[in-house]
Image (spheres, helix red, strand yellow):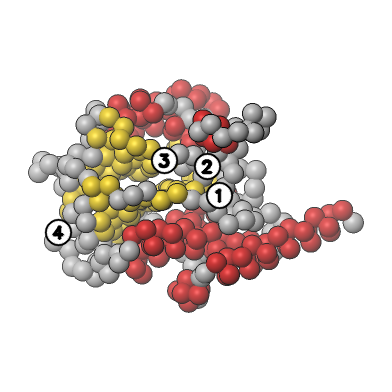
């Protein structure tokens, strides 16, 4: 498995950067993840960090060195991240839960599969053309899909995310067979909110990802000006030619089956994490949601008295 990868995150015009991203890989599988902590709720950056760390920890546990079932892994890791954010909220008796979007891609057996919740996007580009991108879980996308009754709602509001007091809505792609030179780009809305899809696909194809991605990010920041959101991107080019730079390209062919490499810093997860993941099911998530709703109700009642 050979690929080139580049990641970058810029704060833009915001007081702090609530985006998080990273990637990790074994001999047989690679995973790329990006989360965008949501403003208007407490600790958005914490929610994003919990999300990427949970998914990374789950990948490290399950990829030995390949994943037995990629769609099952993506579903379970996303729900585990949601559960961990709810647990963080409950443990600290917060009156509102931290929330984040997430997009995760797995490359294995020459195929890419991805999952997303919210409006952090994945773009797939081949030969300068956008093959596909994820569809945001926003009322704008629903309206564009001709759903009725959405004329008077705020179209940019998301209807799902991780950490909210309801079970998250998510979409999983079918596995896509990768061809040499294919590029996957995961990004926060700070990028696509400033640049249209055609420009993203075009610029991503002009140079190596290590050059194209910083150019895209700078273009987005310049276009948005002082009001720019956080802009975060992680992008990879698949099966790069023999001349790919040894400092930027990654080849897993020579590493052993037990090697796990990651740019995602461990933390926040205690020793009970593995046991909790083993026990995680719909009932556990519903219990967590009920606990959060009750905590929010108590906090609201206390503020009124």
Location of residue 265 with respect to 125 vertically, above or below: below
Residue displayed at 22% across by 45% down: 178
The residue mark sitting in front, 4 or 3, is 3
Label 2 crowding class (10 Å Cα cut-off): few <14, some 14-19, many 20+?
Answer: many
Marks 4 and 3, how far apart at CA: 30 Å
Which one is in front, 235 or 157?
Answer: 157
The numbered mark at residue 134 is 3
Residue that mark 4 sits on: 253
Label 1 crowding class (10 Å Cα cut-off): few <14, some 14-19, many 20+?
Answer: many
Residue that mark 1 sits on: 161
The numbered mark at residue 137 is 2
Label 3 crowding class (10 Å Cα cut-off): few <14, some 14-19, many 20+?
Answer: many
Count of number-bearing discs: 4
Location of residue 252 with respect to 194 vertically, above or below: below
Please report whichever mark, 1 or 3, sits nearer to the chain's N-terminal start. 3
Location of residue 276 with respect to 113 vertically, above or below: below
Name the quadrant containing residue 198.
top left
Please report whichever mark, 4 or 1, sits nearer to the chain's N-terminal start. 1
């Amino acid at each position: 498995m050979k690929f080139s990868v580049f990641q970058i995150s810029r704060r833009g015009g915001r007081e702090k950067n609530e985006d998080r991203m990273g990637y990790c890989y074994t001999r047989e599988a690679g995973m790329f993840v990006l989360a965008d902590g949501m403003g208007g709720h407490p600790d958005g950056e914490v929610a994003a960090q919990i999300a990427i760390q949970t998914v990374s920890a789950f990948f490290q546990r399950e990829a030995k060195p390949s994943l037995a079932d990629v769609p099952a892994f993506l579903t379970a890791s996303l729900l585990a991240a949601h559960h961990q954010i709810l647990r963080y909220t409950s443990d600290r008796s917060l009156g509102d839960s931290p929330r984040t979007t997430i997009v995760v891609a797995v490359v294995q057996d020459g195929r890419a599969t991805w999952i997303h919740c919210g409006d952090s996007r994945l773009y797939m580009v081949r030969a300068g053309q956008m093959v596909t991108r994820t569809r945001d879980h926003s009322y704008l996308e629903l309206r564009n899909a001709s759903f009725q009754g959405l004329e008077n709602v705020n179209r940019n509001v998301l209807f799902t995310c991780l950490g909210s007091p309801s079970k998250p809505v998510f979409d999983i792609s079918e596995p896509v067979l990768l061809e040499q030179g294919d590029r996957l780009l995961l990004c926060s809305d700070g990028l696509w909110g400033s640049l249209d899809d055609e420009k993203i696909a075009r610029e991503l194809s002009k140079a190596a990802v290590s050059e194209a991605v910083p150019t895209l990010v700078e273009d987005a920041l310049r276009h948005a000006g002082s009001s720019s959101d956080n802009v975060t991107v992680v992008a990879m080019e698949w099966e790069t030619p023999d001349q790919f730079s040894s400092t930027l390209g990654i080849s897993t062919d020579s590493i052993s089956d037990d090697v796990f490499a990651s740019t995602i810093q461990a933390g926040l997860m205690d020793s009970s994490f593995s046991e909790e993941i083993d026990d995680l099911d719909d009932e556990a998530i519903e219990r967590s949601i009920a606990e959060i709703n009750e905590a929010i109700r108590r906090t609201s009642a206390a503020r009124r008295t």
